[in-house]
């Protein structure tokens, strides 16, 4: 096994409309591993056309699914990318430059993924420079078991790269709210597992407080009208997450 070979690892579910762009953006990697959770569209067919190591596995949360997928990789260096993301050409060249220089003195790398929403990449505030560990040496750690908002936990130094992951997060508002319902429900499962509570007061303050945080403190007002809309629906996301948790813990259906 070459010490600097990279396995691209992707989890999928009915991603036929985006997966080809994703696979094209990582076809320079030494291996592509795809773990699917029961797609009924052409996701499997497309992945096999690209020569992926393709398998299926029941979905029981993002963290555990990504743990399973990375466990199938042949190489210690993992590039974890979502099925609606693309590695930009500039980021590919940056990674290849690092990995062509022999020993790598880092446990992993953070990749920057700016928000794309309502036809616009956000240039200001927190949403313009969100970064996560996505390229890492699996000898030094891996994904946690979070049902939602999974992350890579590493023992060692991490460096942030300069170029971006392209993520066309939501095709439109309909697509956003499809994800909204799914993610808020998963967030409740995670909260219950971690024995979190939700009071009426928390439910009441989440929307106004969330809007102030997103629009003012995180400076989304600089992102124009899309920044305003993002702040409103993100605050509503927090409100609904706590309302669903309150319902699950206190209201008998």
Image: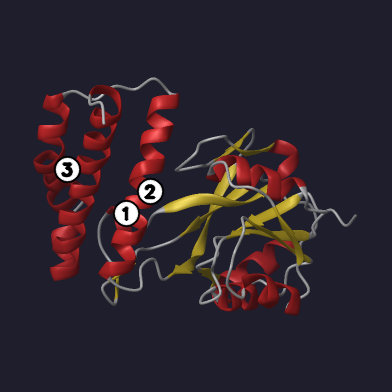
Residue at mark 1 to residue at mark 2: CA–CA distance: 5 Å
Asked if disc 3 and disc 1 are in contact, CB closer than 8 Å, the reply is no
Q: Is 101 or 66 nearer to us in this picture?
A: 66
Q: What residue sits 18% from the left and 23% below the top?
A: 199
Q: Residue at 75% across / 45% down in the picture? A: 71
Please tell me whether mark 1 sits on a helix, a strand or a loop.
Answer: helix
Quadrant location of the C terminus in the rendered image: top left
**Image height of 3 relative to 31, above or below:** above
Image location (x, y in percent) of residue 120: 28, 74
**Which label sits on residue 66?**
none
Residue 63 position in % (x across, y down) = 56, 41
Q: Which is nearer the eye, 224 or 150?
A: 150
- Few, some or many residues within 10 Å of mark 1 (<14, 14–19, 20+): some
- Mark seen at residue 180: 1
- Residue 195 visible here: yes
| Mark earlier in primary sequence (3, 1) | 1
In this rendering, does residue 105 appear at all? no
Indicate the position of residue 28 as horizontal and vertical percent values.
72, 74
Residue 62 placed where, x, y %? Answer: 54, 45
Pair 2/3: label in front: 2
For mark 3, what is the residue? 210
Judge whether 135 appears above or below 18 on screen.
Answer: above
Q: Is residue 183 left or right of residue 232?
A: right
Q: Residue at x 51, y 36 (%)?
A: 146
**Gap in Å between the C-alphas at discs 2 and 3?**
17 Å
- Contact (Cβ within 8 Å) of mark 2 with mark 3: no
Quadrant where the N terminus sits is: bottom right
Provide the secondary structure element on which disc 3 rests: helix
Q: Residue at x 54, y 42 (%)?
A: 61
Q: Mark 2 sits on what residue?
A: 183
Contact (CB < 8 A) between labels 1 and 2?
Answer: yes
């Amino acid at each position: 096994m070459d010490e600097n070979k990279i396995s691209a690892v992707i989890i999928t579910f009915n991603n036929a409309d985006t997966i080809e762009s994703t696979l094209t953006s990582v076809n320079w990697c030494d291996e592509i591993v795809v773990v699917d959770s029961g797609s009924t569209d052409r996701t499997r067919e497309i992945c096999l056309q690209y020569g992926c190591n393709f398998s299926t596995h029941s979905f029981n949360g993002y963290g555990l699914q990504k743990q399973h997928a990375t466990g199938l990789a042949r190489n210690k260096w993992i590039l974890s990318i979502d099925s609606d993301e693309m590695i930009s050409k500039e980021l590919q060249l940056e990674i290849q430059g690092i990995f062509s220089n022999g020993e790598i003195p880092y446990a992993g790398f953070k990749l920057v993924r700016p928000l794309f929403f309502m036809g616009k990449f956000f240039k200001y505030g927190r949403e313009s420079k969100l970064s996560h560990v996505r390229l890492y040496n699996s000898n030094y750690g891996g994904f946690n078991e979070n049902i939602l908002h999974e992350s890579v936990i590493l023992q060692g130094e991490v460096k942030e790269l300069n170029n971006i992951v392209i993520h066309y997060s939501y095709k439109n508002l309909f697509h956003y709210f499809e994800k909204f319902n799914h993610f808020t429900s998963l967030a409740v499962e995670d909260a219950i597992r971690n024995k979190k509570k939700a009071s009426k007061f928390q439910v009441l303050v989440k929307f106004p407080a969330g809007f102030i945080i997103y629009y003012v403190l995180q400076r989304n007002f600089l992102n124009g009208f899309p920044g305003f809309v993002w702040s409103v629906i993100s605050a509503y996301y927090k409100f609904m997450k706590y309302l669903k948790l309150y319902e699950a813990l206190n209201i008998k259906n």
